[in-house]
Image (cartoon, rainbow, N blue to C red):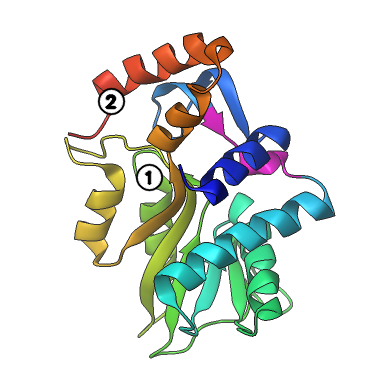
Amino acid sequence: MESYKREFIQFLQGAGVLKFGDFTAKSGRKIPYFINAGMIKTGGEIAKLGEFYARAYFEKLGRKAAVLYGPAYKGISIAVSAAVALSKDGLDVPFFFNRKEAKDHGEGGVFVGYVPQAGEEVVIVEDVITAGTAIRESMAILSQLEGVKVAATFVMVDRKEKGKGEKGAMAEIEEQFGFPVYSVVDVYDIIEYLEEDPANAENVARIKAYLAVNGAK
C-alpha cells in the first residue's frame, strides 16, 4: 500500500471519521463501517483533510482551474479546506456551496460564494459515495447553472458498492453524467490496512461479508 493511503486511513481513524459498527447509509443500506466528515472538528484536522484533497486534485487534474462545489452540509468545509490547500500550492480557485433552503432576502438564491458562469468547470468535493444518491442530488442542484460543466468529483473513500444496478456506484455516475469520480482510498485499501493487525479480524470479516452482497460486480 502506498504510504499516503496508510497515512490517510490513520488520519480518518484518529479524527473519528472512520468508524466500525452498525450504521445506515443515505441509500438505506445497513453498513458495517461509516465515513462521517462531520466528525472533523478542529482547525488542524480540517486543514489536513484539505491537503489530501488537494493532493488528489493535482494528481488527477494537474493545474486545471475549476470551481470547487461543496454540497451542504459536510461538503462545505471540505470545499473550503481544499481551496485553501490548493492556494498554498499556487492554484487559487473559487468555491461555493448550496443552502438546503433557498434564501428569499438579502442576496437571495440557493448558492453561497462564487457562482460559476457559463463555460466554467466545477469540481464536486464530497465525503463518500455509497449508491450515488448524494451526487445525483448535487447534479439536480447544479443544473440551475446554465452552461456550467462538472469536470470531476472527489471523495474520501470509494466504497466499491453497487449503484442502482450491479455496476459500481462511481462507475454509474461516470456513465450517467460523463465525468470521472476519484477517491483518495477505497474500501479494499481499508481492508488491507486493517488486516495488518489481527485485532481487526472481526471488522474485516463483516466488511467482506457486506461486500459479498453489496459489492460492485
Does residue 154 appear left or right of residue 108 in this picture? left
Task: Kindly identify which residue carries mark 1.
Answer: 133
- At 56% from the left and 50% from the top, the residue drawn is 4
- At 38% from the left and 33% from the top, the residue drawn is 188
Asked if residue 109 shows in the view, the reply is no
Asked if residue 208 shows in the view, the reply is yes
Quarter of the image where the N terminus is located: top left
Residue 76 in picture, x, y percent from top left: 64, 59
Does residue 87 appear left or right of residue 134 in this picture? right
Q: Where 199 falls versus 179 (above or below)?
A: above
- At 71% from the left and 78% from the top, the residue drawn is 88
Residue 201 in picture, x, y percent from top left: 49, 11
Instruction: Identify which residue, 134 or 77, lies in the foreground.
Output: 77
Of the numbered discs in the image, which one, if any, rests on residue 214? Answer: 2
Whether the magenta-drawn stretch holds residue 53 is answered as no
Residue neighbourhood size for the residue with mark 1, other residues' Cα within 10 Å, grouped as few (<14), some (14–19), many (≥20):
some
Instruction: Identify which residue, 201 or 64, lies in the foreground.
Output: 201
Q: Tell me which amino acid carries mark 1.
A: Thr
Magenta range: 34-40
Q: Tell me which amino acid carries mark 2.
A: Asn
